[in-house]
Image: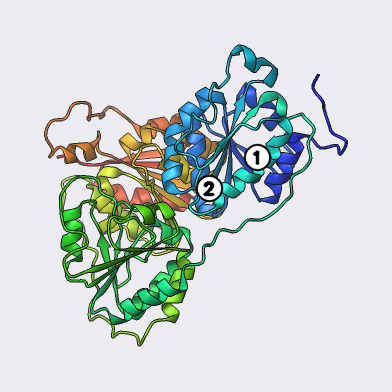
């Protein structure tokens, strides 16, 4: 017999919603299924349910929402098959350090002994190793405490997704409400090591900073700018960083490090002190051997992720909150250095092209987009043009996936927009990337997300062709696609542009439209 309440009148469902409300988690991202039906039936006042048409969409929207809001997001998936659908996005959330609390339905406990339909055989093993913690509570009354622990685990540095499997019949069982408590995870860095690093900075002839996603995640943007200006240190972005951690129009901004040893060594040669902030040492994508650190250089790493500190192959690593660390280094800084005579990097105008080039499209977006807007990007073959022509100059102003998997940015942009009402989000996408999660446009329309989706359609997987030296590679041409038509079919206003003379006008009107989703498909000249 199913019990409907406790002596205190609290059910598992009621306790969970009290927990979610306490932590400000009033948005539920999900794709409804039968084993989760008690959760989203008759949603309490003040909560909203954000539907995604496939589970990978759901997790990516929650990922974007969590990163943009700075707080945890709540996801509900459907049993084993739904979790399987979501695994690509769970992997991305893990690499992005996104605090996402993922719940999944499980069949009713009395049925589990007989291998019922729609049950998960090993629910806690399925999302591993890409969640920080996973549990299916032993008793129904343990579910609220498990979710409370999951929220804290998701948010503690390094943040990341967690997983709770919940049998269908648990929601109506009686329970006690767990303590509504707070947990903070800002790790105080070691003072003695900080003093040593401060002395190294003061004594360096030409220090350089390498900044990564952890710096923006720890809210250390302003502190990084102040410290770099004090020491007049050149600032590079770590390879494949998924966030912007330093204003890219700043005179001290030097550029983006490539993902190989040889080029990193070449670009950092001449600096006697390399200080890596909020990034691994280093992330590589292809093998080109080189000396790290370059000859004559000392390397220091400051991160809040112990794994990144332990995995560094050279240098001294300090684990601690980036904002606290940089404020302490600034307090220990000596006399400011004289300003450099000229900026370290200048934005170049795009070269001439017969049709619309990727560089031309990015330059137009730079000129026409609102100042200090948020950009979500997944256009691998145009990443260099994004770097060269679309500088980001605000904290929390750029999000990309750290996993390398496709399908993140389109739904993530929806989650980012929902976390920033009243602000237009610019999503820069490739045509191939868009097709991994194109049904996210339906969610954007359904929830009136203020996103301008700009699809740079080059007719295929051009990034892969580039890796192959532009040789003939099978399976990379996908030219008979119309993203504008797919958008219109889901209720999203869309326009396709092929004429360079019309590009500015089309983009200007799209930015001005505001208030909901719209898509511009820019046909990139492949000649």
**127 or 511: nearer the eye?**
127
Instruction: Provide the secondary structure element on which disc 1 rests.
Output: helix
Q: Is residue 310 left or right of residue 75?
A: left
Q: Nearer the viewer, residue 508 or 23?
A: 23
The residue that disc 1 covers is 146
Work out how far the residue at label 2 is from the one at label 1, CA to CA, in angstroms: 16 Å
User: Is residue 440 something one can see in this rendering?
Assistant: yes
Look at the image and tell me whether residue 515 can be seen: no
Task: Point out the image quarter for the N terminus.
Answer: top right
Q: Residue at x 70, y 17 (%)?
A: 110
Given residues 495 and 270, the one toward you in this image is: 270
Does the CB distance between marks 2 and 1 fall below 8 Å? no
| Rendered location of residue 468, percent (x, y) | 15, 37
Residue at point 39%, 60% (across, down):
278
Which image quarter: residue 431?
top left
Up the image or down, 46 lies above or below 489; here it is below
Identified at 75% across, 40% down, the residue is 15
Q: Picture coordinates of residue 283 (x, y %)?
A: 29, 51
Quarter of the rendering containing residue 394: bottom left
Please indicate whether residue 321 sits to the left or right of residue 146 in the image. Answer: left
- Which numbered dot is residue 99? 2
Q: Is residue 272 left or right of residue 125?
A: left
Q: Nearer the viewer, residue 524 or 406?
A: 406
Q: Position of residue 380 (x, y in %)?
A: 28, 44
């Amino acid at each position: 017999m199913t019990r409907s309440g406790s002596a205190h009148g609290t059910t598992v469902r009621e306790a969970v919603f009290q927990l979610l409300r306490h932590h400000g988690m009033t948005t539920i991202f999900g794709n409804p299924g039968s084993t989760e039906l008690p959760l989203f039936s008759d949603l309490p006042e003040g909560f909203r349910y954000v539907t995604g048409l496939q589970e990978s969409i759901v997790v990516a929207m929650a990922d974007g929402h969590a990163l943009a809001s700075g707080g945890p997001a709540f996801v509900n998936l459907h049993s084993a098959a739904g979790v399987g659908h979501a695994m690509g996005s769970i992997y991305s959330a893990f690499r992005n350090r996104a605090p996402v609390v993922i719940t999944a339905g499980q069949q009713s406990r009395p049925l589990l002994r007989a291998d019922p339909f729609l049950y998960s055989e090993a629910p806690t093993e399925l999302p591993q190793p890409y969640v920080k913690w996973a549990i299916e509570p032993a008793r129904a009354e343990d579910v609220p405490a498990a979710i409370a622990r999951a929220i804290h685990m998701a948010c503690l540095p390094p943040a990341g997704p967690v997983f709770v499997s919940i049998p269908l019949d648990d929601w109506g069982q009686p329970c006690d409400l767990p303590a509504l408590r707070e947990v903070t995870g800002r790790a105080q860095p070691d003072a003695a090591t900080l003093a040593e690093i401060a002395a190294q900075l003061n004594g360096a002839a030409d220090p350089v900073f390498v900044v990564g996603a952890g710096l923006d995640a720890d809210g250390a943007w302003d502190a990084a700018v102040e410290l770099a200006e004090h020491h007049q240190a050149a600032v590079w972005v770590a390879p494949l960083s998924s966030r912007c951690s330093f204003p890219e129009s700043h005179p001290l901004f030097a550029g983006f490090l490539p993902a190989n040893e040889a080029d990193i060594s070449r670009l950092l040669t001449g600096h006697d002190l390399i200080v890596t902030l909020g990034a691994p040492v280093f992330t590589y994508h292809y093998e080109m051997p080189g000396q790290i650190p370059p000859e004559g250089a000392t390397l220091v790493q400051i991160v809040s992720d112990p794994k990144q500190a332990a995995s560094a192959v050279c240098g001294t690593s300090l684990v601690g909150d980036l904002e606290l660390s940089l404020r302490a280094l600034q307090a220990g800084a000596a006399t400011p250095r004289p300003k450099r005579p000229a900026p370290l990097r200048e934005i170049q105008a795009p070269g001439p092209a017969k049709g619309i080039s990727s560089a031309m499209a990015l330059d137009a977006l730079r000129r026409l987009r609102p100042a200090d807007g948020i950009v979500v990007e997944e256009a691998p073959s145009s990443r260099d043009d994004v770097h060269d022509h679309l500088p980001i100059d605000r904290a929390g102003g750029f999000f990309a996936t750290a996993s390398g998997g496709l399908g993140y940015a389109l739904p993530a942009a929806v989650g980012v927009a929902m976390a920033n009402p009243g602000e237009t989000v610019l999503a820069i996408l490739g045509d191939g990337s868009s097709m991994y999660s194109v049904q996210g446009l339906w969610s954007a329309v359904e929830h009136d997300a203020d996103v301008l989706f700009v699809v740079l359609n080059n007719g295929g997987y051009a990034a892969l062709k580039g890796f192959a030296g532009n040789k003939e590679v099978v399976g990379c041409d996908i030219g008979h696609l119309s993203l504008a038509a797919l958008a219109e079919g889901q209720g999203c206003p869309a326009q396709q542009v092929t004429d360079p003379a019309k590009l500015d006008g089309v983009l200007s009107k799209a930015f001005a439209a505001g208030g909901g989703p719209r898509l511009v498909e820019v046909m990139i000249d492949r000649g």
